[in-house]
Amino acid sequence: MAADPPRGVVPSAAAGGQRLAQVPRGVQCFFGDEARRRRALESQVVSVFEGWDYEEIIPPLYDYAEVFSDPDLQPRTLSFMGRDGGVLALRSDFTSLLAKIAAGRLSDRPAPIRLYYSGEVLRDEPLRTGTQSELYQMGLEHLGGDPRAADAEVVAVAAECLERLGVEGWVVAVGHVGVLGGLAAEAGLAQGALEPLRERVDAKDAAGVRALAEQAGASPECVAALGALIEQTGPPGVLPRLAAALAFCGPARDALAELTGLVSSLVEAGLGDRVVIDLAEVRGFGYYTGVVLRAYAPGAGADVGRGGRYDSLLSRFGRPMPAVGFMFGLDRLAALLDGRRPAASGAPPEAEVVTAAALPDALREARARRARGARVRLEVPEP
Amino acid sequence: MTLTIALAKGKLLSGTEALFRKAGLPFPNGDGRRLVIPVDAVRFLLVKDVDVPTYVEHGSADCGIVGRDVLLESVPDVYEPLDLRFGHCTLALARLAGSDFDPRRASTLSVATKYPRLSTAWFLERGISPEIVPLGGSVEIAPALGLADCIVDVVETGRTLRENGLEVVDEVAVSTARLIVNRASYHARREAVAELMATLQRAIP
């Protein structure tokens, strides 16, 4: 027996037959000024990456699904069956893919390896307004080398991108996953208690975090430290207070010391008024092991860029090596800068119209003007 | 720097006004018609409660004041730094009074509610996949009309439930008013946001 058709579900083009203009959820299409503006933004960011001696890599659009097996990534990855029966997946993350390439194809390259990419990732995002499945990302990965220098370098490159783009009022929030990790271990939280705690830390709900930690039987100093992660957010001046709050917990203290080292370098390099400390920044992929970064600008709604240190990811692909990366979301940057700088890329020059009664003459004339670099538009009368 | 604050029209508005006045913060004098109201250095948006998280998540407002019940349903990507400790209510599971039907033990179940996501999650955790009857209001009349076996709805005093012949079976969640903050504003407009948070914190009962 045939089932009744579902009500309220937008029929697919295949089922309906008539809706040729209909698009599937999550896809975007750009043209005209918008397309030009996106290309201009991309080339500005990429030129900064090149300027810091990062090398472009154009990775494949799909690979084996296991490349994208990070627990936070895997459910959002679009996978399909290959002809040989292997499970393949559309790239949902550049970092995982570049880690695989650095460990494989580039295995004979000495560290440090500096790579950048610019392109789309595809995600199977939950149905929500404003959530696109195609995200255009421009990012870099610094693989191997001295981690301290690499972290600082990556922030400096990101900072230059934001300066060049003319983003106003931007800040980079820096955190370290080892702090909450250390405190959670110290508190002896059961696996089931960790996720609700993380959720409240992410919401910056200090009272909620303290209540959960007390319920879970954490020590008073641990409860106080968890509260401090949230309440001591802000300019680098909060670091001494955080150090005092975390002094009792070795792993959290070590993580904070690492972060403090990075922040001092940035402050000394003149970026102090652009850095904010946010140890309650605990979202992001599970592969992060150290410093985590988010770039914010007023009016952007969410972060315009993000990154962090992932020291264990490359060992999954057989070349253990510390690494750090950062990426900008082109869609977020374009939305932020749209209208603020309407003529950022400028309209293209007016085309020279080439007309001639005979098509061969018109073509010859157009080719000659093209050789001089003109923008031409052929207008040949119909015979 | 001007902050934009989204306020929920409806039952939280008087409590919000009391808190803002106590804190010495500007507050719009309600003429009921204007929806964007500048007062001193603050711009207020008066919007439907379920829309407050939307304005804040997308950055149209830097901050908002909304019930935790709304946040539990819409799960917006915002910070939620302060429990403002007014607007106390319970999200309760309720059935016809005197019934011996226990929705938590049912094999099939229909639930009328304004909170479909939250209600579904709550029953799924208990091993029941409920059929949701989504309603926008007057949820309390659904069981008597046979529209649903039970309801999940906001209960403040319990009077509306009693008057519609219902009784509470279980507590799904408790709610109070919360300050929510846009993620970018929290960092990139930090001085203004931090000052608002500190001022409100001092006035919280």
Image (spheres, rainbow, N blue to C red):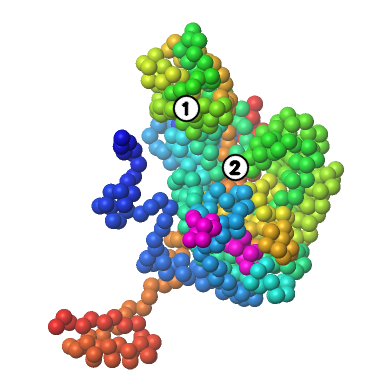
Residue A194 seen in the figure: yes
Residue B24 or residue A335, whichever sits in front: A335
- Tell me the element at label 2: strand
Mark 1 crowdedness (10 Å alpha carbons): few <14, some 14-19, many ≥20: many
Q: Earlier in the sequence, mark 1 or mark 2?
A: 2
| Residue A87 highlighted magenta (yes or no) | yes
Residue B93 spot, x, y in % from top left: 52, 20
Q: Is residue A335 above or below residue B135?
A: below
Which of discs 1 and 2 lies nearer the camera? The answer is 1
Q: Are marks 1 and 2 in contact (CB under 8 Å)?
A: no
Q: Residue at x 17, y 88 (%)?
A: A357
Question: Which chain hosts label 2?
Answer: B
Magenta segment: A80-102
Residue B116 or residue A96, whichever sits in front: A96
Residue B38 spot, x, y in % from top left: 47, 42
Q: Amino acid at mark 1?
A: Pro
- Tell me the element at label 1: loop
Residue to which mark 2 is pinned: B79
Q: Residue at x 46, y 31 (%)?
A: B116
Residue B133 spot, x, y in % from top left: 41, 27
Q: Amino acid at mark 2?
A: Tyr
Residue to which mark 1 is pinned: B130
In the displayed structure, does residue B189 sit left or right of residue B38?
right
Mark 2 crowdedness (10 Å alpha carbons): few <14, some 14-19, many ≥20: many
Quadrant in the picture for residue A165 = bottom right
Quadrant in the picture for residue B81 = top right
Q: Residue at x 50, y 20 (%)?
A: B106
